[in-house]
Image (spheres, rainbow, N blue to C red):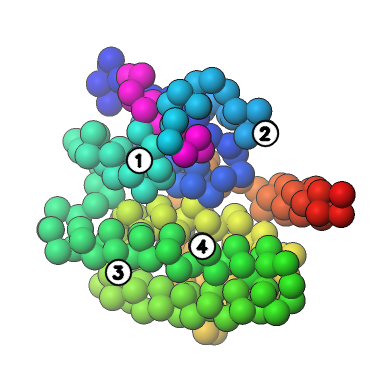
Amino acid sequence: MAAGDDLKLLGAWASPFVIRVKLALNFKGLSFENVEQDLSNKSELLLRSNPVHKKVPVLLHNGKPICESLVIVQYIDEAFAGTCPSLLPSDPHERAIARFWAAYIDDKLVPSWVQSFRGKTEEDRSEGKKHLFAAVEILEGALRECSKGEGYFGGESVGLVDVSLGGMISWLNASEVMSGTKIFDPVKTPLLAAWMERFRELDGAKAALPDVDRVVEFAKKRAAAAAAASEN
């Protein structure tokens, strides 16, 4: 990291998308200022930095904003290409495959998990759970293919897909605690179950992943607030 590089992350501690960016910064060994945002009263800096979506995360690199978690993670890898590890493979085909699976997580895993966790009816939650486990099964195959027998989607070291899925770990664990249902089951998806334990032990992950009990408490408070709002 050059002496003149100034990195600020506008985020909210519980956001899995913000956690993704923290993971990427940590794995690259980059120093950054974490600027926690109150999403119920968004700061002028956030609104000015992301005028389109008005959401976190936003990375400010020497004052210039970059928005959307996967865009930010890839930007970090490119802007600090000389800093190991590289989160994207050098081979164009392997790089395209990594981007495909990172997008799959956002397009398939995240929406089905949200539906299974926050669906308004039991039927809605059940449908979400069905799609969630289908997506997890497909990701088990993707890990088998992408890891080439190593420990991560990126092979010997973490890559884009590991960071993308890694940002979800605390929330997936929290939903397991609240529902009693294992998402990465050691019997049904042994590779993903082992991957999650391995990932959690990385120093960069330990520094970025919020405590599961804290996420559970946050989720319960948000659910209670949503229920109270719907009654009024």
Question: Which of disc 3 and disc 2 is earlier in sequence?
Answer: 2
Taking depth in this image into account, of 34 and 116 the one nearest to the observer is 116
Residue 123 placement: quadrant: bottom right
Residue at figure coordinates x 58%, y 37% from the top left: 12
**x%, y% of residue 117?**
66, 65
Identify the residue position indicated by label 4 in the image: 110
Camera-nearest label, 2 or 3: 2
Residue 203 horizontal side relative to residue 91, left or right? right
Residue farthest toward the top in the current orientation of the protein = 4
Q: In this picture, is 92 found above or below 85?
A: below
Please name the residue that numbered disc 3 is placed on. Answer: 147
Q: Nearer the viewer, mark 1 or mark 2?
A: 2
Please name the residue shown 64% across and 70% down the image: 116
Q: Amino acid at mark 3?
A: Ser
Please identify the quadrant where the N terminus is shown: top left
Name the residue that disc number 1 marks: 72
Q: Which residue is mark 2?
A: 40
Q: Which residues are magenta?
A: 53-65
User: Residue at horizontal 50%, vertical 42%?
Assistant: 18
Q: CA distance from mark 4 to mark 3?
A: 22 Å
SS for dot 1:
helix
Give the vertical position of 193 relative to 91 (above or below): below
Disc 4 element = helix
Q: Earlier in the sequence, mark 4 or mark 3?
A: 4
**Dot 2: within a 10 Å radius of its alpha carbon, few (fewer than 14), some, or many (20 or more) residues?**
few
Give the residue drawn at x 25%, y 21%: 2
User: Horizontal and vertical percent for residue 178?
Assistant: 74, 65
Q: Residues within 10 Å of mark 1 (few under 14, many from 20)?
A: many
Kindly identify the amino acid type of the residue bearing the numbered disc 2: Ser
